[in-house]
Amino acid sequence: MPFTTANGLTVHYDLTGPANAPVLLLANSIGTTLTVWDAVMPALTARFRVLRYDMRGHGLSAVPAIGADSGYSMDDLADDALGLLDALGIARAHVCGLSIGGMMAQRLAVKAPERVDGLILCDTAGLIGPPSIWADRIAAIRANGLSSIADAVMTRWFTARFRENNPDPLRGYVAMLSRTPQDGYIGCAMAIRDADLRADNARITAPTLVVVGTEDLATPPDLARALAESIPGARFVTLPDAAHIPCVEQPAALSRLILDVLSGLSVPAEMPERGLYDRGMTVRRAVLGDAHVDRSTARASDFDRDFQEFITKTAWGSIWTRPGLDRKTRSLLTIGMLAALGKDGEFKLHIRATRNTGVSRDEVKEILMQVAVYAGVPTANHAIALARAVYEEMDAEGNVG
């Protein structure tokens, strides 16, 4: 039963899987412990070193004090996760978060993009509200205890079919919720109540999958779809016959999704060459878009097929995935260098890619001002004209960046 100190708190965690495998951090939902992931662990630990933990105020982790109307914040929860990675000497990880764990993961990916390789956001949103819902729930808990909301919560966590067919596990989850420290639950409820991550999510650069149960009442599919649309290049997938806790109701389907998405971003030691290509192709598609990559691969011939594989493995699989810079920074640097070198075709391609990398037009403008100083005014003037033309095309297509 391992414990460590992270962000000044005692944190209960579990780290399981091959010692040399990529790390996958799992962050669970409010009112649960790390055991909520038990059913997906066999599949995930076959490919990853899986780190799960009890968030502050839950399970066996510390319960920081809260005030009458001041609890924890989403920054607190993200800093806890960073502190845990630091305490265990983990430089980078894939992050999969469920519900409040998914909100924490969004915040973590914005605060420390260099630490997040891939992002899985399960049954969550950038804003879960309105705040009055959480105010009412907090008042009910303070008046009557957590057990008083358990039945209502179960109808949101699980489908009617699961509740009917699994009475013993259902009682177990009622007990898990009811035994959560009251201050811990309320503190996290306040973090959800006060968090609106929607504006910052455009800054997420990690390859992202948003997944939601088709019968989720807590964060319905339309809300999860809006989350995916707010994150550059994010994929959106629904899981049939699942409500808010798919790792319990549909563990096999969720595991397959996680493995499919993350396998291309991780290079197993036994297959480095193929792993580099797969990872590079995933990043290349995330930055340049499926349509461009599909056209490039379709046009490849025997003459240039080796070159296409070379750039996918080296530029995209090795350089764009290095930990030192986040994807947005690499996008800005690439735009600046291509402008300075006068590589018009590639420059226009990477201006168009800004809709996937989160680079704003104002940031491109600043980069081209740098180009004017260090590579010459005529060079920058030409690049500005090219960028304006690309933005006008994007606007006409409805791709406002």
Image: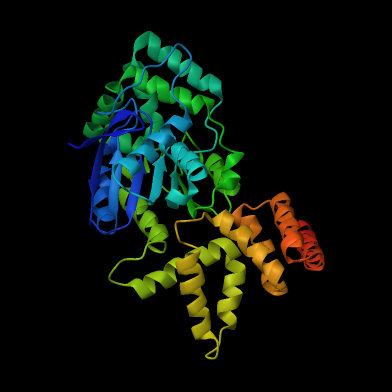
Q: Position of residue 246 (x, y in %)?
A: 37, 43
The residue at the point 42 percent across, 25 percent down is 188
Number of callouts:
0
Residue 400 percent location from the top left of the image: 72, 53
- Compared across the picture, whether 78 is left or right of 374 comes to left
Q: Is residue 242 visible?
A: no
Give the camera-side residue of 374 and 23: 374
Task: Determine whether 5 is above or below 342 in the image.
Answer: above
What residue appears at the point 27 percent right and 55 percent down from the top-left corner? Answer: 43
Quarter of the image containing the N terminus?
top left
In this view, the residue in front, 266 or 214, is 266
Q: Position of residue 75 (x, y in %)?
A: 47, 32
Work out which residue is located at the far front of the displayed protein and give it. Answer: 374
Towards the viewer: 219 or 393: 393
Residue 75 lies, with reference to residue 382, above or below; the image says: above
**The furthest residue to the bottom:** 303
Confirm whether residue 379 shows in the render.
yes
Q: Where is residue 270, by image quadrant?
A: bottom left
Q: Is residue 363 left or right of residue 311?
A: right
Q: Residue at x 29, y 56 (%)?
A: 48
